[in-house]
Image (cartoon, rainbow, N blue to C red):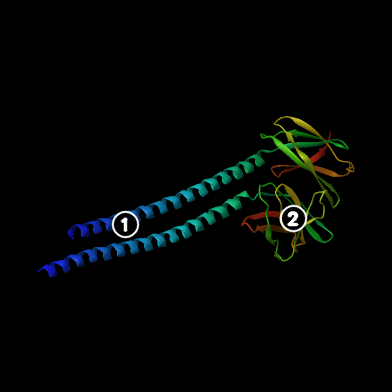
Amino acid sequence: MYVIRGRRGVSEVLGAIVIAVLVLGMSASYILLEMERSERETFSLIDLIRRAERRQKILLSLIYYQVNDGQLEVYIYNFGDVSVTPVKILTDVEVDLFEIYDASVNNGGLPLNEIPSETLVKLVLPVPSTDTFSFVLVTEEGGIFVWEMML
Amino acid sequence: MGNDALRCRRGTVSIGAIAIIAVFMIAVSCFALLIVEYDRYLYVVKVSTQKLLLRGRENLSVERLETSKLKVINKGSVTSFVVGIFVRSGSDIQYIPLDTPINVKILSEREIVLPDGITEEMDVSVITAYGNVFWAAESP
């Protein structure tokens, strides 16, 4: 009787310990999984918000355009707070090659890769085949600017 | 022995409670992070929208007084800041940024001295901080 009662006691404690370990393990795994998932989802949302924020900061203004030496010259002023990187230009077709220059007399002709804040730049590209077209500028930050032009 | 088991069960319940609290705290901290980011985004939207609104309200009248002077009159409902002079002579373009922007208050006028080399035949305009361009008319 004594032996049997003693064994029963041990198994109850063991059972409780096993359950505790199981709960602890499952809880820890769940917390870790939840942490990872929450972190991933939160940061993907934060990334989306930050991209939208960058897009909002882009402010470009068309100042002037003309055809000179068989090239279309477009003068654009960046009145936003951030530099803007043009990645694609569309006129009547997608423009494969375009150049950006600082338009100020101080730095005239300085080639640029982006349109710095509070700077006027000259974009040089081939003349479109049509007289009237939409000039579409797509930026790396996701901004899209459309200006109607007539030559 | 019964007490030990009971203690272990209590411990299990405590662990469960801690797990739930931890998950709740993770959720709260993630939510707080999102709120902070979204708040910043809303501020940026507000600033950009204000800039665009002010840009639409700008209205400057620019006159050539003499060869070397411009008179800028603010007829708009917002203070304008002239940041540069844009000059066109045929297909030659010059942009002269000003070292310090010239502010033109509502219903006031300012004179801007043009740099050397700008002749009467050239078309002159001013560019403002809000990205507007106003071309000069010959003075009557």
Where residue B133 sits: x, y (%)?
Answer: 74, 44
Q: Which of marks 1 and 2 is in front?
A: 1
Where residue A140 sits: x, y (%)?
Answer: 64, 59
- Describe the element under mark 1 as helix, strand or loop: helix
Write down the chain letter for disc 2: A
Badge 2 amino acid: Met
The residue under label 2 is A150
Give me the disc on residue A119.
none
- Residue at 86 percent across and 40 percent down: it is B115
Compute the Cα span from label 1 to label 2: 72 Å
Where residue A86 sits: x, y (%)?
Answer: 69, 58
Where residue B73 sits: x, y (%)?
Answer: 75, 33
| Other residues around mark 2 within 10 Å, as few (<14) / some (14–19) / many (≥20) | few
Badge 1 amino acid: Ile
Asked if both marks, 1 and 2, belong to the same chain, the answer given is: no
- Residue at 71 percent across and 42 percent down: it is B129
Can residue A56 be seen at all in this image of the molecule? yes
- Residue at 71 percent across and 59 percent down: it is A133
As drawn, the residue found furthest toward the top would be: B108
- In the picture, the quarter occupied by the N terminus of chain A is bottom left
Say above or below: A44 vs A1.
above
Q: Which residue is more in the foreground, B137 or A26?
A: A26
- Residue at 31 percent across and 54 percent down: it is B17
Write down the chain letter for disc 1: B
Q: Quadrant of residue B15?
A: bottom left
The residue under label 1 is B15
